[in-house]
Image: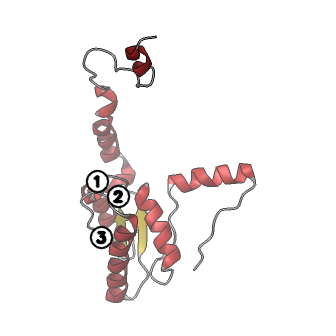
Amino acid sequence: MSSQTETSAHLPPLPPEGRWWGNPLRENRWQVELAQLLAEPVFRGNGLPRGDNRAVVLMPGLGGGDLTLLVLANWLQRLGYRPQLCGFVANAGCSEAAMEQVERQLELLHQWDGRRVALVGHSRGGLYARALACRRPELARKRHASRQRNRRSGVLARTGMKEPSCRR
């Protein structure tokens, strides 16, 4: 066996020839979904209870920044809440540093009006919301479950394991 054959046996396969163009229809789906959302009566606030002017901290998912939550922030504001973006350009850094940043914001918002703050997070932001609600229950209104948590709970139920609780 030649040395070239031995070396190529340990290398990953080469990509197919030609340029990969992705799936443009799937990648541009967000535009259609946004148009559908804007047409929904719920987005206009029809038939929904008004908010109590409570602060709501919004936390984006992995790699996302505050800009990804502007539509949600606008909707919450029209419903009568005070949405607050957490100041992430991209949620890609150290989780502990990010949570400390949001925790300081929670403390300031709680001091400002004396009420607990609602936490809403998408994906990784949802994990932050849950951790902060456990860490500082006196500041957070309640835990908002993320889709990942619900999926994990189903797995835990099937295996007989219990969901971890907030511990200090």
Q: Which residue is drawn at 63% across and 66% down?
A: 164
Most distant residue in the right direction = 160
- The residue that mark 1 highlights is 68
| Residue 53, label in figure | none
Q: Residue at 45% of width from left, 20% of height from top?
A: 9
Residue 84 shows which numbered tag?
3
Q: Observer-nearest residue: 23 or 167?
A: 167
Label 1 sits on a secondary structure element that is helix
Indicate which disc, 1 or 2, sits on the residue closer to the N terminus: 2
Coordinates of residue 17 in the picture (x, y in percent): 29, 14
Residue at 46% in and 73% down: 132
Total numbered badges shown on the rendered structure: 3
Image height check: is 123 above or below 20?
below
What kind of element bears circle 3?
strand
Who is closer to the viewer here, 48 or 37? 37
Question: Which residue does the image show at 33% across and 16% down from the upper left?
Answer: 16
* C-alpha distance separating marks 3 and 1: 13 Å
Contact check, label 3 and label 2, Cβ < 8 Å = no
Looking at the picture, how far across and down is residue 35, in whole percent?
29, 41
Q: What residue is shown with label 2?
A: 60
Q: In which quarter of the image is residue 113?
A: bottom left
Labelled pair 1, 2 in contact (Cβ < 8 Å) = yes
Give, as a three-letter code, the residue at label 1. Answer: Thr
Marks 1 and 3: in contact by CB < 8 Å? no
Q: What element carries label 2?
A: loop
Residue 157 in the image, given as x and y percentages of width and height? 71, 53
Residue 51 seen in the figure: yes
Task: Compare marks 3 and 1 and give the one earlier in the sequence.
Answer: 1
Task: From the top left corner, tell me how far across and down residue 63 is, in percent.
Answer: 32, 52
